[in-house]
Amino acid sequence: MDPKISEDSSSEIMFMELALDHAKEAMSRLEVPVGCVIVEDGKVIASGSNRTNETRNATRHAEMEATDILLKQWQNSGLTQSEVSEKFSNCVLYVTCEPCIMCAAALLFLGIRAVYYGCANDKFGGCGLILSLHESNSKQASSSAVGQGKNFKCTGGIVASEAISLLRSFYEQGNPNGIYSHNDLLH
């Protein structure tokens, strides 16, 4: 068993499999196959998948899609900013690929409790591979505005091979909206 995965790995795998379903759905729309779910008290309360190609907006990552759904719901229900912060502090995000620097900073700012991810993001990883923004006392986070958030637990490697397989399949067929050919990305 992978030492990175906690004792309660059955629920972590179940939620990650739901995130993988969203990644597959993204791939069917010719999006980079990354998906996520946000869980509160053992229940999925939001989900998202990449929509960067569809929207022509590079910020529309799966994590941003899911958190925006929650922000809108909670604000429409009349929650104050401090109540929204409290709600996020009880949430766990499951995402198929390590959050990029932008998403990790946003999750830190929102005060999410924990993040579980599938595969590492070797180009833009914000939860340990490139930067460790999930640790607000890290040198990178404390030197920026995002250093105001709370640390969040970050655990990777859950169903990583499945996440990698999806990404590999997507890039082998070529991202129709990408600037690089699949050969550039696979070597």
Image: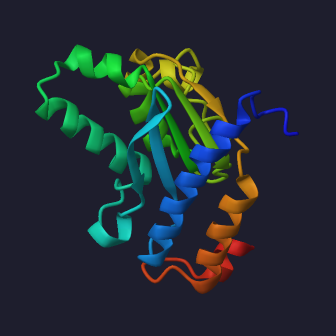
Query: Residue 179: horizontal and vertical position, in percent?
Result: 48, 77
- Figure disc tally: 0
Query: Residue 181: horizontal and vertical position, in percent?
Result: 58, 82
Q: Residue at x 20, y 19 (%)?
A: 81
164 up-or-down from 181: above or below: above
Q: Residue at x 46, y 83 (%)?
A: 176
66 up-or-down from 116: above or below: below
Query: Residue 101: horizontal and vertical position, in percent?
Result: 50, 41
Q: In the visual, does 28 lie left or right of 10?
A: left
Query: Residue 28: horizontal and vertical position, in percent?
Result: 47, 77
Which quarter of the rendering shows the C terminus?
A: bottom right
Q: Residue at x 65, y 77 (%)?
A: 169
48 up-or-down from 180: above or below: above
Q: Nearer the viewer, residue 73 or 41?
A: 41
Determine the residue located farthest toward the right in the rendered image: 1
Q: In the visual, does 159 lie left or right of 37?
A: right
Determine if residue 178 is in view.
no
Q: Nearer the viewer, residue 100 or 31?
A: 31
The colour scheme of the drawn protein is rainbow
Q: Residue at x 35, y 53 (%)?
A: 59
30 up-or-down from 12: above or below: below
Which quarter of the rendering shows the N terminus?
A: top right
Q: In the visual, does 133 lie left or right of 145?
A: right
Quadrant of residue 127 in the image? top right
Determine if residue 83 is in view.
yes
Q: Nearer the viewer, residue 20 or 81?
A: 20
